[in-house]
Image (spheres, grey):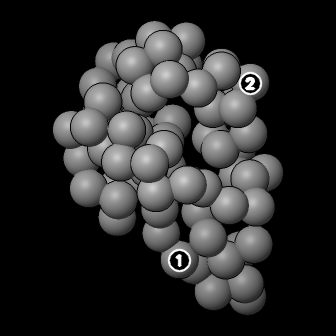
Amino acid sequence: MAIVVDIDVMLARRKLAVGTLAELVGITPANLAVLKNGRAKAVRFTTLDALCTALECQPGDLLRWVPDDAD
């Protein structure tokens, strides 16, 4: 997939656990894991907003595009 999710990078920078972030965002740890591991097919803007608020970052800090042939 060409979209890479860097939630784990931001979690490490903020020294937050997945469970803590899930609680702050208001989603289950399982749903956060789906996002974090790049298995999600979509993300709601409200969830992206909550992630950015909790991690004090911009959407571009969490999502980036990489050409398929660059994997």
Q: Secondary structure at mark 2?
A: helix
68 sits to left or right of 14: right
Task: Give coordinates of residue 55: x percent, y percent.
Answer: 29, 34
Point out the residue furthest to the left here.
Answer: 56
- In the picture of the structure, the residue carrying the numbered disc 2 is 30
Q: Amino acid at mark 2?
A: Ala
Q: Secondary structure at mark 1?
A: strand
User: How many numbered markers are drawn?
Assistant: 2
Mark 1, other Cα within 10 Å: few <14 / some 14–19 / many ≥20: few
Point out the residue furthest to the front here.
Answer: 46
Task: Give coordinates of residue 61: x percent, y percent.
Answer: 34, 56
Task: Give coordinates of residue 53: x percent, y percent.
Answer: 26, 37
Instruction: State whether residue 61 is above or below residue 3.
Output: above
Give 3 or 41, whichever is nearer the viewer. Answer: 41
Question: Dividing the image into 4 quarters, which one contains the N terminus?
Answer: bottom right
Point out the frontmost of discs 1 and 2. Answer: 2
Label 1 to label 2, Cα distance in Å?
24 Å
The residue that appears at 50% across and 23% down in the rendered structure is: 26
Q: Residue 41, located in which quarter of the rendered image?
A: bottom right
- In the picture of the structure, the residue carrying the numbered disc 1 is 65
